[in-house]
Image: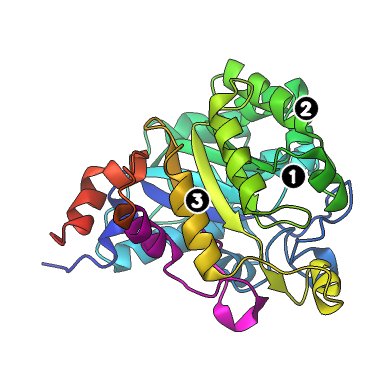
Amino acid sequence: MQVIRKPTRMLSGVTIVAVMTHPYPCPHGKCIFCPGGVEVGTPQSYYGREPTLMRAVENNYDPFYQVQSRLKQYVENGHTPSKVELIIMGGTFLAMPLDYQEWFVTQALEGMNQFPEANKKTFTYLEDAQLRNENASVRCVGMTVETKPDWAKEPHTDQLLRLGATKVELGVQTIYDDILRFTNRGHSVNDSIEATRILKDAGFKVVYHLMLGLPKSDPDKDLEALKTIFQDPSFRPDMLKIYPTLVVETAPLVHLWKRGLYKPYDTDTLVELISEMYRYIPKWVRVMRIQRDIPATIILDGNRKGNLRELVEKRAIEKGIMINEIRYREVGMVWQHKGLT
């Protein structure tokens, strides 16, 4: 009997397969906190050492081979992938050329259709790949796409539906227009509100990316932002990713930091702030992530603790805060909390 390594990878019942698009510039320019981009040879918003990105580079950013490589890793770890959630990473996917979007999704699906015995890649249409996948041994049961609020309007939503997407990660980052302007985010709060409405009306699950400690913000403003996101019906995402702002050498923010004009939150501040946020996160929301997967060795300033979520949950319990979000209450995760796995 083969020992299953990393069982948490499939505790939710699906196999996560993340793939990365080729580096492509954002139309609006570059956000000051962005560590990546074509000028440093990486997809937008990625610094270069993420496992998904390294796998993409090894496979020349080809989605077919990225999918095949990841599925093989699961098998080697004792898993039997059958239901896949495909996550398309690499920046604002919908800002890329339409023919590239269609090719990318088609080849990712073909990577599943032909697993484990991959035939030589041939041209195929998106609709044909989707049809074959319905009866494949490895089926795509969910597809997540990253985009910015200004690239999530009606035409973009129509394209997402055609590609087969089911979930959209929106880079909202903050609900303060002055911070969005200062960080050169390229969208407004109204864009976030409109994108949320359009995506929900079209039936998508909506994930917000929320950044803490951006320039011109503070813990009180960040806490108020989270309260507003769940109290104001104009927002209310289904899921949340919380990303503390970090200083790295390749992000323009480093210049403000070197001049003493910016200081990110330290670990203690983040633990107190995020644990307090748990008071206001409803039970119908899933907190998918609490920090970026960035090695401490390249972080110039900011949190370097790799177990930030664990520290936050421990502090919330110490403060008597009930953690209601879905991931914490999920059966497999509850076993871990109680030391049963």
Q: Which of marks 1 and 2 is in front?
A: 2
Q: Give the residues in magenta.
A: 289-316
Q: In which quarter of the image is the C terminus?
A: bottom left
Q: Seen from this angle, which residue lies furthest bottom? A: 297
How far is mark 3 from mark 2, CA to CA? 38 Å
Mark 1 vs 3, N-terminal side: 1
The three-letter amino acid code for the residue at tag 1 is: Tyr
Task: Say whether residue 298 is magenta.
Answer: yes
Tell me which corner region of the image, top left, top right, bottom left or bottom right, holds residue 66. bottom right
Residue located beneath label 2 in the image: 190
How far is mark 1 from mark 2, CA to CA? 29 Å
Q: Nearer the viewer, mark 3 or mark 2?
A: 2
Q: In which quarter of the image is the N terminus?
A: bottom left
Mark 3 vs 2, N-terminal side: 3
The colour style of the image is rainbow
At mark 2, the secondary structure is: helix
Q: Where is residue 291 in the image (x, y as percent from the top left)?
A: 53, 60
At mark 3, the secondary structure is: helix
201 shown above or below 317: above
Residue located beneath label 3 in the image: 111
Horizontally, residue 33 falls left or right of residue 103, namely right
Q: Position of residue 247 (x, y in %)?
A: 71, 71
173 shown above or below 158: below
